[in-house]
Amino acid sequence: MLGFKSFDTATSILSGVEAMHMIKKEQIALRDQSVQNQKEFIHQLFGLAA
């Protein structure tokens, strides 16, 4: 058990884990499986600044 302190923290961490699994299983359509494309996918998914 990771001991999440809040629901928001748990949601963020588990969303990231699921995103990594999606990339690993190639369930998303990337031009290729390069690290740069994976990084861009994560930034778009979580609304991070590029």
Image (cartoon, rainbow, N blue to C red):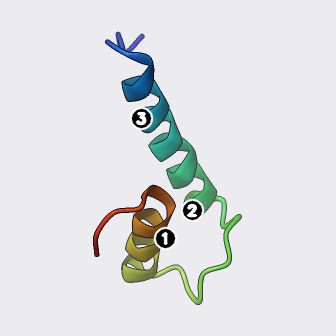
**Mark 1 crowdedness (10 Å alpha carbons): few <14, some 14-19, many ≥20:** some
Q: Marks 1 and 2: CB-CB under 8 Å?
A: yes
Q: Nearer the viewer, mark 1 or mark 2?
A: 1
Q: Amino acid at mark 3?
A: Ile
Between the residue at mark 1 and the residue at mark 2, the CA separation in whole angstroms equals: 9 Å
Residue 23's disc is: 2
Q: Residue at x 44, y 63 (%)?
A: 42
Query: Is 21 on the left or on the right of 46, as rendered?
Result: right
Helix, strand or loop at mark 2: helix
Can you say which quadrant of the picture contains the C terminus?
bottom left
At label 1, which amino acid type do we have? Phe
Report, in whole angstroms, how far the alpha carbon at label 1 lies from the one at label 3.
Answer: 16 Å
Q: Nearer the viewer, mark 3 or mark 2?
A: 3
Q: Is residue 50 left or right of residue 8?
A: left
User: Label 1, on which residue?
Assistant: 41
* Left or right placement of residue 39 versus residue 19 in this view: left
Residue 39, image x, y percentages: 38, 71
Question: At label 2, which amino acid type do we have?
Answer: Ile
Q: Is residue 38 above or below residue 37?
A: above
- Residue 13, disc: 3
